[in-house]
Image (cartoon, rainbow, N blue to C red):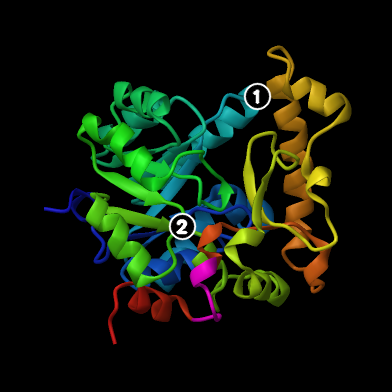
Amino acid sequence: MNQFLKHSGVEYPIIGGPMYPCSNPELVAAQSAAGALGIIQPLSLTYVHGHDFREGLKYIRTLSDKPVGFNALIEKSTRKYHERMANWVDIALEEGVRFFITSLGKPDWVVERVHACGGVVYHDVSEKKWAQIGVDCGVDGLICVNRRAGGHCGEMTAQQLYDACAGFDKPMVCAGGVSTHQDLQAMLDIGYQACQLGTRFIASQECKVSDAYKQAIVDAHEDEVTTTYKMTGIPVSIIKPDFVELEQLKVTGIIGWMLRSKRFKRLARVLLSVKTMRNLKTAIHKKDKQSEFWMAGKSVAGVHQVLSVREIVKQLMDEK
């Protein structure tokens, strides 16, 4: 039995990856309506797309009554941020969300709240040590982020990450490098129970980003996707613009020094992330293809046209 399908209540082993700033509510609802699992990214819902959080959840429910999930970014930051995220988790539970994905932190408090309401928690991991933390906290599954992922990516191949984490005996979801039916089937053959896709769904009709961003994904080759620390202080996969040299993607100066310092590394990441969040909020609407670093993964190799979410899901499942 596919444990992911049992945990999520969806028809297909597909998760729409939670993306800042690309996860607009219409995209999330369309993914769930098509039989996949749409995931609410709270900062996208509120900060980028302007919805009150609870009202945004209710709006998604008017578009689809199928299950949706919620992405809790739980990296240690300020008390105010933690309180806001905890409040969002509580509201999501009150509104009937029962599938949660935790990212960038120790998920014990999320697990406690979600399990008390009969829900499940899957934890983002890029290597075995992060999986161990999640398992020790009682998570129900693992989102295994490999080196082909867009946005924040890992350093291991999908096979290496599966082998590293298989011993935990938890359902595993492959995140990274999937945009076609063949990609999806290859990951299921390895032993993954589902795949999480972000890049493929950016190039969809329902995603509210600029046509330039979507076309950049359609036009890109996988060897044009590279990583940079300049956006958040940890590796982020982007389509390298023609006008930017690889050397320009490195972090230098005082911020570079801070990233190498144990004492100031976290502060440097916060400073970079805040700046990037502000830039991305406006950049996704720019019409100039060369005006921004577009986040995307190696799966651009299989993206050749902008389609509706339903068409994308059908293609992934090889349904005519």
Decide if residue 192 is on the left or right side of residue 211: left
Q: Residue furthest bottom?
A: 320
Nearer-N-terminus badge (2/1):
1
Magenta stretch: includes residue 303: yes
Name the residue beneath numbered marker 1. 78
Q: Position of residue 144 (x, y in %)?
A: 39, 42
Q: Secondary structure at mark 1?
A: loop
Coordinates of residue 135 in the picture (x, y in percent): 30, 26
Amino acid on which disc 1 is placed:
Thr
| Residue at the spot of label 2 | 177
Task: Say which residue appears at 33% left-offset and 48% top-offset.
Answer: 173
Q: Which residue, as the protein is rendered here, is positioned at the far top?
A: 263
On the rendered structure, is 223 left or right of 35? right
Amino acid carrying label 2: it is Gly
Q: Is residue 266 above or below residue 238?
A: above
Specify the quadrant that holds the C terminus.
bottom left
Looking at the image, which residue sits at the far right? 253
Q: Residue at x 76, y 36 (%)?
A: 272
The picture places residue 301, in percent across and down from the top left corner, at 53, 68
* Front label number (2 vs 1): 2
What range of the chain is rendered magenta?
301-307
Please rate how many residues cluster around mark 1, counting C-alpha atoms within 10 Å: few if below 14, some from 14 to 19, many from 20: few
